[in-house]
Amino acid sequence: MKLFPIRGGIHPDYRKELSSEKSIVTLPMPVALYIPLQQHIGAPAEVLVNEGDLVKKGQMIARSGGAVSAPQHAPTSGRIQAISAIAAPHPSGLAQTTIILEPDGKDEWANLPEPIADPLNADPQLIRERVAQSGIVGMGGAAFPSAVKLDLGMRYKLEILLLNGAECEPYLTCDDRVMREHADEVIDGARIMAHALGTPRVVIAIEDNKPQALAAMTQAASVFTGIEVVGVPVQYPMGSERHLVQAITGRETPAKKLTADIGVVVHNVATARAVHHAVRFGRPLVSRVVTVSGGAIREPNNIEAPIGARVADLVAFCGGFAVVPERLVNGGPMMGQPLPGLDVPVVKGMSGILALTAGEIDPQPASACIRCGSCVTICPCGLVPVEMAAFIRKDNFEVAAKLGVMDCVSCGSCSWVCPSHIPLVHYFNYAKGMINAQGREQRKNDQTRILSEAHTLRVEKAAADKAAALAAKKAQAAAAAAAKEAAAKEKEKDETPA
Amino acid sequence: MLIAVGSLTVMGVALGGILGAAARFLAVEENPLEEELKAMLPGSQCGQCGYVGCGQYAAALAKGEAPVTLCTPGGKTVIETLAKKLGVTADFSEHEEKGPEYAVIIEDLCIGCTRCIKECSVDAIMGANKLMHSVIAEACHGCAKCVKVCPTDAIVMRPIPETLGTWHWPKPEAPHQHVVH
């Protein structure tokens, strides 16, 4: 298959060998699971259980909170200990409503929905509904509800389902292991998703640094037609949705558009596996494979952990820390976010937990920009990071937006390459947050204006109605008085003797 | 040809003259500064400054009748931009910085008098006579006018909490200071 070049990009030290040869192991059930209501992009789920309730594995414990949302299911059987606010695995460390489940050790499944018989000929709507009910979200890290993405076939003419097995982030090996060990499940999930989307072609893209995964997937796909397994060059950020589409099709996704606009829908390989479980066995998404790695971890590993296990449980399972970590990261080292602590739970979008040493992160103070242009050369989105950062430093978001800061995918290549160690991507994340906040404020102001105008109209109408009613009453009274007077006159006339 | 040139010239001169006269005699008195100041204000017409809306406050500012520190929702940023525009120094002693707020009715204290409902300019309060009232948090724009009319002090203003959806990265610390020689 002919591949197309992508712009820019970097070649960091991948360090995947720390965990790439470790088979997936299942985490022993922790003493408590913490299931947050918001593990996805969109509205938080709504709680369906009460404190003290007994639940079975796979039972829905929180339902979808809107059109873009996902339900949560009990990862094991047990008792609901509490529903309270605890710190989220989010850089802010803000608390969010979380269901705390005390496992009973039996791990008993609830009555699951029936498997969909012959899903490759089933009504696509049935598959989408099953995916939505199963709480499946994008497992590559973005955690966007998958069912919403499977709906794209209704609105767009799609050609390709692109399965993302690039795993371009250093350290991470969870997708690699899933593809090596569960290739058949991934392929089956991909075929089901392609049927739901109505795409004739399935392309599975895997970076060339995972030869075993490539071999396993090629082998599993060889019995089916219409599935191509492609090795793509090792170039960060190859795994970015838009860049992978460009590498495979040669087409660039326009700014502010979706890849669906150019006929491609991208899903992660682990998501495909979750779809396989949901459709073939009726099992909701209750666990995921997480890579626990980094120089500070004693024995890096790939762990299949129930959703809601604490990060501390996984770290302890890996033998704890060999040295005190300088930084804890949720995800990969390039795009991952700092973890506020070890007590936060594993969520559906958490692909990696990294405990990095000072030597690995190599923090350096930022110095002045030397105008070398490296960031411009490597920006995979074709932006000019140095110029955008200069305007953002002066809080000039208008110009930054014109320069395309909202098209930045936050891949971090510019920060990585900068010889002056300027935190470029941090500036862009700040600017994106500020621009979004301004948008929210603007919407609120618009709403306030509409409400206030409606209020004024209503008050004026009420006043006018009142005045009209008063006038009508007055007129009536006047008419009555006139009639009375006339009658009196008539009477007077009658009484006057002729 | 001469007729054409001549008539067009005459028309041009005559129409130009009319336009010039109209611009002079029918000109609308407008202070451009007022418009600029209005654009700097948040525009939610909340009335917390004491004027009816942002336009009236901008007019007062332009005439130099009002201090720049009155806009509560705008916060320090708006005050600073206004001060810079008007070339005055902002007196922050009167101003206390606070984020956006919304009104909450303490249910135990509400007697159902409907005064707050009448006061609310965005119809964000539900309720009826002698029945408990409640604020629709999404519609409330934090003007606090209801707080002032409540006879039982049953309304309090609470800051809108930050959520995972609204949080974003703060600005990075200045990476380097430019030294001016």
Image (cartoon, coloured by chain):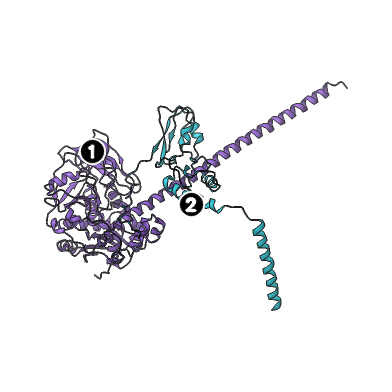
Chain colours: A purple, B cyan
Q: Position of residue A142 (x, y in %)?
A: 28, 53
Q: Which mark is residue A352?
A: none
In the figure, A474 relative to A417: above or below?
above
In the figure, A204 relative to A328: above or below?
below
Q: Position of residue A104 (x, y in %)?
A: 16, 37
Q: Is residue A246 left or right of residue A342?
A: right
Q: Amino acid at mark 2?
A: Lys
The residue identified by callout 1 is A100
Identify the chain of the residue marked 2, using the numbered disc in the image: B
Pick out the residue farthest to the front: B181
Q: Amino acid at mark 1?
A: Ile
- Is there a contact, CB below 8 Å, between mark 1 and mark 2? no
Q: Is residue A340 left or right of residue B33?
A: left
Q: Position of residue A185 (x, y in %)?
A: 19, 55
Q: Give the quarter of the image for residue B25.
A: bottom right
Which quadrant, please, contains the C terminus of chain A? Answer: top right
Query: In terms of secondary structure, where does tag 2 sit?
Result: helix
Q: Nearer the viewer, mark 1 or mark 2?
A: 2
Pick out the residue farthest to the right: A498
Pick out the residue farthest to the bottom: B1
Q: Position of residue A421 (x, y in %)?
A: 26, 59
Q: Give the quarter of the image for residue B164.
A: top left
The residue nearer to you, when weighing A57 against A429, is: A429
Identify the chain of the residue marked 1, using the numbered disc in the image: A
Q: Is residue A307 left or right of residue A258?
A: left
The residue nearer to you, when weighing A428 against B36, is: B36
Query: In terms of secondary structure, where does tag 1 sit?
Result: strand
The residue identified by callout 2 is B85
